[in-house]
Image (cartoon, grey):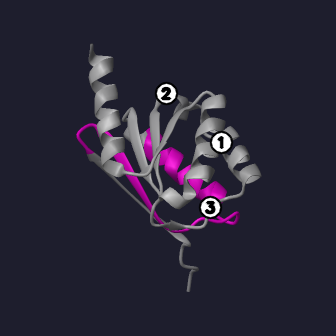
Amino acid sequence: MGKKADYQISSSVNNGILEIVLTGEESVNNIEEMKNEIDNIIITNNIKYVITDVRALKGRLGISNTYQRVRRYHPDIHKFKLIIVDLPENADYQRFHETTAVNAGLSLKFFTDIDTAREWLKIEQREEKK
């Protein structure tokens, strides 16, 4: 019998926004596989605005693993506007993730409220149409 995945990924499109939800557990053992799956979902859907909801995901990577992960994002990911939604207790970690991503040329923002994240992306959509 095969090993059960440590994590699950689901995605949907709502109002021109790709929403990805991660559940289960993130660890150094699955970081590369998870990153590749998320990159593939984003690139395949080719929707510019992406929210990744990690509030139900257990575990967070260390600072050095996060830095390395950001540096290994697929080059096409740079054309998307990315949002991470996480719990308030992970704010310091996600601020580091956000800063590292921006320094690597990505458009990534961190929010603790998914409705605020959606509203921010809707404003971005409207601004770009002007």
Q: Is residue 21 magenta?
A: yes
The answer to whether the residues at label 3 and label 2 have Cβ atoms under 8 Å apart is: no
Q: Quadrant of the C terminus?
A: top left
Where residue 70 is drawn, which disc sits there?
A: 1
* Amino acid, disc 3: Arg
The furthest residue to the bottom: 1
Q: Nearer the viewer, mark 1 or mark 3?
A: 3
Residue, x 59% and y 44% (percent of image)? 95
Could you say whether the residue bearing mark 2 is in a helix, strand or loop?
helix
* Amino acid, disc 2: Lys
Give the residue pinned by disc 2: 79
Give the residue pinned by disc 3: 60
Q: Residues within 10 Å of mark 2 (few under 14, many from 20)?
A: some
Residue, x 61% and y 27% (percent of image)? 105
Q: Nearer the viewer, mark 3 or mark 2?
A: 3
Mark 3 and mark 2: Cα distance apart in space: 25 Å
Residue 70 image position (x, y, % from top left):
65, 42
Vertical position of residue 86 compared to residue 49: above or below: below
Q: Residues within 10 Å of mark 3 (few under 14, many from 20)?
A: some
Residue 38 image position (x, y, % from top left):
50, 50
Q: Quadrant of residue 49?
A: top left
Q: Which residues are magenta?
A: 14-43
